[in-house]
Amino acid sequence: VQLQACGGGLVQTGGSLTLSCTAAGRTLDFYSLGWFRQVPGKEREFVVGFRRSTSNTYYADSAKGRFTISRDSAKNTVTLQMNSLKPEDTAVYYCAADNSYRILSVFMTPAGFEYWGQGTQVTVSS
C-alpha cells in the first residue's frame, strides 16, 4: 500500500490542524494504522495508533485528550485531528500502516509498521 500524507503547516499555540493520509493500492480496512512524529536528532516517536487485531486505539501520553485518529473507509483515508497544539508538537508527522500481527510493545514503535507516508511538517509557534 502507498501512503500520501498532507495537511501540515504553521499554526499558533492553541490552534488546530488536521493531517490526512490517503492510501493507494489497498484498502486500509485491513490494516493497523498509526501516526508518528520526528524532530531532528531524535528517534521517530509514536503518537497514536489503531490496532486492527484488537480494534483498540492507543495514544501517547503527549497526545491524550488533544489528538484523535479516525478512518474514512469510503475515501481510504486516515486522519489525525490535532487540537490545543503546543510548540513541543512541532515535528515531521508520518502516517503508517501495517497488516501483520504485532505485539503491543512493537506496535507502538516504528518497527511495528511496514508502510510509511512521506511525512508532513507541523510547526507550532509560541
Image (cartoon, rainbow, N blue to C red):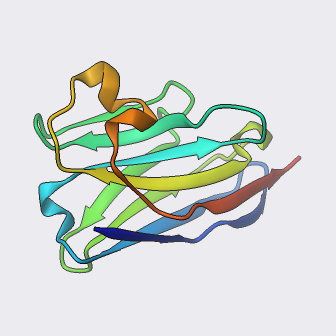
In the picture, measured across the screen, residue 106 lies left or right of residue 82, that is left
State the image coordinates of residue 82 (x, y, percent, origin top left): 55, 52
Residue 19 higher or lower than 46, as above or below: below
What residue is at 33 percent from the left and 49 percent from the top?
A: 114
Q: Residue at x 76, y 61 (%)?
A: 11
Q: Position of residue 103 (x, y in %)?
A: 21, 23
Provide residue 80's location: percent of width, then percent of height. Answer: 45, 56
The N terminus, quarter of image: bottom left
Compared with residue 87, is residue 92 higher up or lower down, i.e. above or below? below
Q: Is residue 68 above or below residue 43?
A: below
In the depicted structure, whether residue 28 falls above or below residue 65: below
Q: Nearer the viewer, residue 56 or 25?
A: 25
Which residue: 78% across, 49% down? 13
Quarter of the image for residue 16 reads bottom right
Of 74 and 120, which appears nearest the observer?
120
Residue 74 is left or right of residue 81, and the answer is: left
Residue 109, position as x, y percentages in the image: 42, 30
